[in-house]
Amino acid sequence: MVIPSHNNIIIGGAGMGSDLELEMIRKRLLLKMLQKKKTSKKKILVEVITSPGCPYCPIALKIVREVSRKYPQVEVKEVSVATPYGMEKAMKHNVLGTPTILINDNVEFVGVPNPKEFEKKLNQYLFNNS
C-alpha cells in the first residue's frame, strides 16, 4: 500500500520496512527543522585579548576557536596588547588581565572560559540579542 503524505513523501510498500522508512523520514525532517532554527544571519566578532608570555592565552584562544567553528557567522580574532591596536582596545575596555574575551566589543570573559559557558554566551548573541 502506498500512502501519500502532506509533504508529498510516499511511504510504505509491501515488504519495504514501512515503520523503519517512516522513522528515517521523521528523523530527516526533524534534523532539517533544527538546522533551520539554528541558523542566524547575525555576524559576531569575538576578540581574544592576549599578551606575550601569558600561559593561559593559548588555552583560551583554542577554546574560543573550537567552539566558534560550529558557527560560520562567528569571526575570531586574536588581539595582542603588544600591538598599538591591542593596547588601545585594552585601554578602552579597562583590561587588567589576559586573556580577556570580547564579543561584539563587550567584555564577556576574563580568564579561560568554560567551553559550555562560552557557547551559551555565543548563542545569546546569535539568537537573543537584537
Image: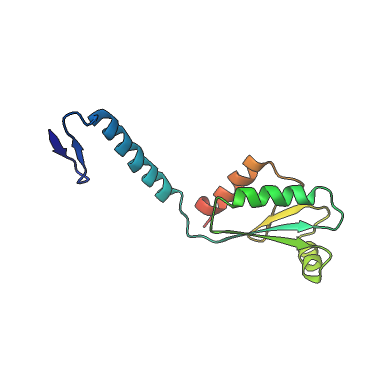
Q: Residue at x 81, y 71 (%)?
A: 84
> Compared with residue 130, is residue 59 higher up or lower down, i.e. above or below?
above
Q: Position of residue 25 (x, y in %)?
A: 30, 39
Can the viewer see residue 109?
A: no
Q: Residue at x 63, y 49 (%)?
A: 66
Q: Position of residue 60 (x, y in %)?
A: 73, 49
> Compared with residue 128, is residue 81 higher up or lower down, i.e. above or below?
below
Q: Residue at x 35, y 37 (%)?
A: 27
> Compared with residue 106, is residue 87 higher up or lower down, i.e. above or below?
below
Along the horizontal axis of the image, is 64 left or right of 51?
Answer: left
Along the horizontal axis of the image, is 102 left or right of 15?
Answer: right
Q: Nearer the viewer, residue 27 or 77?
A: 27
Along the horizontal axis of the image, is 76 left or right of 31?
Answer: right
Q: Position of residue 19 (x, y in %)?
A: 26, 29
Which residue reaches farthest bottom? 84
Q: Nearer the viewer, residue 59 or 89?
A: 59
Q: Residue at x 12, y 33 (%)?
A: 1
